[in-house]
Amino acid sequence: GIFRDSFANVVELLDDLFEEAAQADEPPERNYVRKHALELAGRGCERPAARLFSNPAGDYGSMVNERVGSGEWEEADELGETWASRNAFSYGRGAEKGQARADVLETLLAS
């Protein structure tokens, strides 16, 4: 969150990089950004090249440390779910400033 908020220009440049990679004239088996963007686009996903995820706008921390410190977890999957739910917000150029996109993050993490 601090990097995202302090270096918005870098977030935009990285977003541009992923957009360019997704549109590169390369076979998908050699360009995984393109491969996954094409798959997401085929499912009707908006901005399928988005790859920058973080906490909700103005919020910081994944809350995983807090759950570990307080002992409020029993299975490792619970910590993973906490991290994923807290970091499911997409950032990039334009209006992409913390849009909830849990489905896209989940798809990318599964690949």
Image: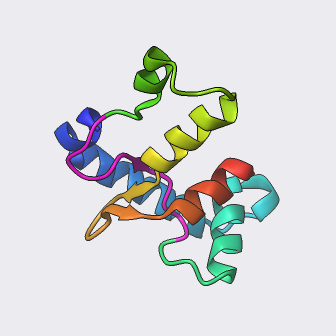
Q: Position of residue 55 (x, y in %)?
A: 35, 46
Q: Nearer the viewer, residue 47 or 64?
A: 64
Q: Position of residue 93 (x, y in %)?
A: 30, 63
Of all residues shown, which one is farthest toward the right?
29
Q: Residue at x 67, y 59 (%)?
A: 107
Q: Residue at x 22, y 47 (%)?
A: 8
Q: Position of residue 46 (x, y in %)?
A: 49, 78
Of all residues shown, which one is farthest toward the top?
69
Q: Which residues are magenta?
A: 48-60
Q: Is residue 71 above or below residue 53?
A: above
Q: Is residue 68 above or below residue 75?
A: above
Q: Nearer the viewer, residue 30 or 48?
A: 48
Count of numbered tags: 0
Q: Is residue 81 left or right of residue 59?
A: right
Report which quarter residue 7 is drawn in. top left
Colour pattern: rainbow
Q: Is residue 78 above or below residue 56?
A: above
Q: Nearer the viewer, residue 37 or 64?
A: 64
Q: Residue at x 63, y 56 (%)?
A: 106
In the image, residue 49 lies in the stretch drawn in magenta? yes
Q: Position of residue 111 (x, y in %)?
A: 75, 51
Q: Is residue 17 left or right of residue 111?
A: left
Q: Is residue 75 left or right of residue 82?
A: right
* Prevailing secondary structure class for the magenta stretch in the rendered image: loop
Report which quarter residue 48 is drawn in. bottom right
In the image, residue 102 lies in the stretch drawn in magenta? no
Q: Nearer the viewer, residue 26 or 13?
A: 13
Report which quarter residue 10 is drawn in. top left
Quarter of the image that includes the N terminus: top left
